[in-house]
Image (spheres, rainbow, N blue to C red):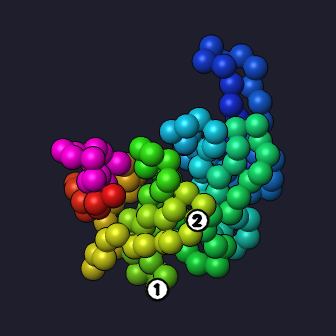
Amino acid sequence: MMSIYIMNMDGTNPVRLTDSPEDEKSPLWSPDGTQIAYSVVSVGINRPQQIRAITVDGTNPVHLTDNNSGWKDTPTWSPDGTQIAFTGEREDGSGTDIFIMNADGTNLVQLTHSEGQVVGQFPSWLPVAGPSTTLIEAISWGTIKANPR
């Protein structure tokens, strides 16, 4: 069982934020420092993996994606904290793509539509020229899509 902890920069004062029978991993702080998005691997045979967020004091855990299909991993916040991009399995189970949703889990959009098994993982947000455009890139797999914001 993996859990999410926070601690001081020098490693002192570890505080456990999550405590469940599930594996909780891939934590990432929101830009404003008030929340942490993370992946949750459910117990059981199929072990679907989902995205959740929790406030930094360990209260108010929120399920951002449903528990019904596939896996979702490597959540990453947009620079303004209003959206989260992640790698996810397609509903038909044929491979993975990059998805984006609002920080509250609404407005889920599949950004890539590859025909192969895996598009890439570890999406990141990169500001480009102009305030209205952000580029989402899958690390080590190349550029995925420019998404105006």
**Residue 67, x across and y down, in percent:** 66, 73
The magenta stretch spans which residues? Answer: 125-141
Q: Name the element at disc 2.
A: loop
Is residue 127 a member of the stretch shown in magenta? yes
Which residue occupies the foreground of this view, 32 or 71? 32
Q: Can residue 3 be seen in this view?
A: no
**Residue 80, x across and y down, in percent:** 45, 45
Label 2 CA crowd tier, 10 Å (few <14, some 14–19, many 20+): some
Specify whether 25 is left or right of 3.
Answer: left
Q: In this view, does 3 lie above or below 7?
A: below
Q: Name the element at disc 1.
A: loop
**Residue 4, x across and y down, in percent:** 69, 41
Specify whether 116 is left or right of 76.
Answer: left
**Residue 61, x across and y down, in percent:** 74, 53
According to the image, label 1 marks what residue?
Answer: 92
Quarter that holds the C terminus: bottom left
Q: In this view, does 61 lie above or below 3?
A: below
The numbered disc on residue 105 is 2
Q: Calculate the distance from the C-alpha at mark 1 to the C-alpha at mark 2.
A: 21 Å
**Amino acid bearing label 1:** Asp
Which residue occupies the foreground of this view, 73 or 32? 32
Residue at point 56%, 69% (across, down): 106
